[in-house]
Image (cartoon, coloured by chain):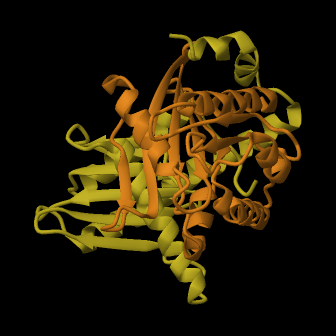
Amino acid sequence: MLEADLTLYEEDARRLTAVLHKLCEDAKSRAVFLIDKAGQLIASAGETGSVDTTSLASLTAGNIAATSGLAQLLGEKEFSVLFHEGEKDNLHISIVARRGILVVLFDSRSSLGLVRLRVKRASEDIGQVFAEIAARAEQEAGRGKATLQAQFSEITDEDIDNLFKG
Amino acid sequence: MSFINYAAREINCKLVYYGPGLCGKTTNLQFIYTKVDPGTKGKLISLATETERTLFFDFLPLELGSIRGFKTRFHLYTVPGQVFYDASRKLILRGADGVIFVADSQIERMESNIESLENLEDNLAEQSMSLEKMPFVLQYNKRDLPNAVPVEELQAALNPRNVPWFEACAATGVGVFETLKGAAKLVLSEMKKKT
């Protein structure tokens, strides 16, 4: 497979959410989402209550995938930033650390320039957390089973069967 | 590419429905959507043309329940079946944890089935993946039609490795959940093996 599976521990989630909270505030945005390229929501901050985050994550990933396809078609490595302008709300979508997608939802209280500036900083911070997650995953792969993941391997066929009962 | 989130205690997996145009991939998702308890599903998103042909993908998030305190969530995707949407199919396959191939049982669609299965193998190979190495099941759809070929013939043409297969009539829902369960089980077993 091209990309390794992603395993997020509580500490990772806490750090990523902290970065997103800061970005949301600094960029004066309504909400911020971090999504992986397969369309799973990793973390979010801000006014996320009114948004269907699962659908948002999947559609954004589809959007990024289509745009990457376009880029390759034209001989570009990738188009790393997308901007969607609406009547009230706007979306700034960017690729972070190759495997993540950062989505900033903002209205007239902010501006594209400010969002771009703050996204740059936050992307570096997210990149660092991702790098640490990747390094840890590699270490764990070297050591065989990770202690926490060992708990996962104890899942029995019966557990899986039970999911489908009823 | 599964995503295990210890913070939210969730396991997220991506399942892709593949197959030739009009074989019933979207119909599978639509049936699941109508039958599942509203609390355990999200919105069904269909990016389709005005004539209801899938243009990019359909998407349905589904929560199956908990295993050892972890919520298991499956994200179901369909690909557009029509031959000329190959670029989109490749994109949707990326990061898939398992594939369900929906074959159209009608005799006149046999060639399309074989073509689509070969296309699936080619597209996986481009991403350094292969059907042998990933959870994969087959669904023989439209079993209710008078021109359906016998299962033995479908098996011989499409399933030389004898992976799990299911007979279905997606329009009425026969076999739809059996197929989904078959695939989900393989994905979870695979994840167990990997850890």
For this rendering, which residue is in front, A36 or A56? Answer: A56
Q: State the residue at coordinates (66%, 17%).
A: A160
Does residue A114 lie above or below B139 as drawn? below
Residue B106 at x, y percent in the picture: 63, 54
Q: Which chain is orange?
A: B
Residue A128 at x, y percent in the picture: 58, 52
Q: Is residue B11 left or right of residue A30?
A: right
Q: State the residue at coordinates (28%, 64%).
A: A91
Does residue B72 lie above or below B86 as drawn? above
Residue A106 at x, y percent in the picture: 21, 59
For this rendering, which residue is in front, A122 or B27? Answer: B27
Q: State the residue at coordinates (80%, 61%).
A: B128
Q: Residue furthest front?
A: B146
Q: In the rendered image, which quarter contains the C terminus of chain B?
A: top right
The answer to whether one can see residue A76 in this image is no
Check the rendered structure and report the hue given to chain A.
yellow
